[in-house]
Amino acid sequence: MTPFDAYKQYLALKNHFGKEKYDYHKYAGKSRASVASFNKRKDKYWFEKLSRQKSDEEIKNFFIANFVAADDPNSLWIGNVIRLGDTYYKEWVKRQQSLQYIFTQESESLFDEYDLEQAFDCSKGHPPVLKKFLIGNISPETLVIYSKIFPIRNKFDKQLLDPIWESVSMKIKKYTPFLNIDVFKYKKILKGIVIGD
């Protein structure tokens, strides 16, 4: 990947995670970027360094990790990515490598405190599952897996009309296509936790 390609990858993923209507997969990662605009950027050398240090797939995952970690992908400044990007990327890689373990641990913690209905109950505001996500006790990946098993996004979208949930809902929607998950396997794990083996 050339430095300019890395920049285009950054723009495409920023659009994907930050804009409701842009879909990275639908548009095959294309963005309207010109070499001239790239050459004027003060941070272009960082893209050069990134393209030398990482493979094409690693560059893509590096940006995914950073946009998933961001509270607001639209306002994620490239300076923060340059400064903190490797930290978020390493944490993301670690989570991918131990996804099943993390999901199991986080689910056991959630369902030790709440039953299935309580965990996803939003009749009194934010449900416990969302509160745990917001304080960092549930990873974005676990939240995506829950949304693949249960229709929580649709349910919460109807019942929670607040900007916090709206940003989390968008994050789930935009992150889901990047996670290749065996839903049946995770349903089985969850059943074992909730009902018992």
Image (spheres, helix red, strand yellow):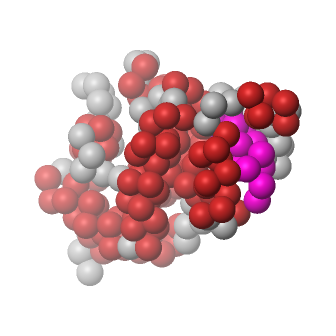
**Residue 50 falls in image quadrant:** bottom right
In this view, 20 is above or below 116:
above
Relative to 70, 28 lies left or right: right
Placement of the C terminus among the 4 image quadrants: bottom left
Percent x, y for residue 109?
A: 19, 59
- Residue drawn at (46%, 48%), measured in percent from left and top? 85
Q: Is residue 182 visible?
A: yes
Q: Nearer the viewer, residue 138 or 84?
A: 84
Q: Quadrant of residue 17?
A: top right
The reply, left or right, for residue 158 in relation to residue 51 is left
Q: In the rendered view, does 54 fall on the left or right side of 87?
A: right
What residue is shown at x 76% (from left), y 59% (from top)?
1
Residue extent of the magenta highlight: 1-16
Say if 123 sits above or below 83 in the image.
Answer: above
- In the image, 107 versus 40, the foreground residue is 40
21 up-or-down from 3: above or below = above
Give the residue displayed 71% in from the left and 43% down from the top.
7
Left or right of 131 on screen, residue 54: right
Residue 108, magenta (yes or no): no
Residue 175 drawn at (x, y percent): 56, 48
Residue drawn at 41 percent across, 52 percent down: 88
Q: Along the line of sight, which residue is nearer the eye, 2 or 66? A: 2
**Which secondary structure type mostly characterizes the magenta part of the structure?**
helix
* Residue 155 visible in the snapshot: no
Residue 182, image x, y percentages:
55, 71
- Tell me if residue 9 is in the magenta stretch: yes
Q: Residue furthest bottom?
A: 197
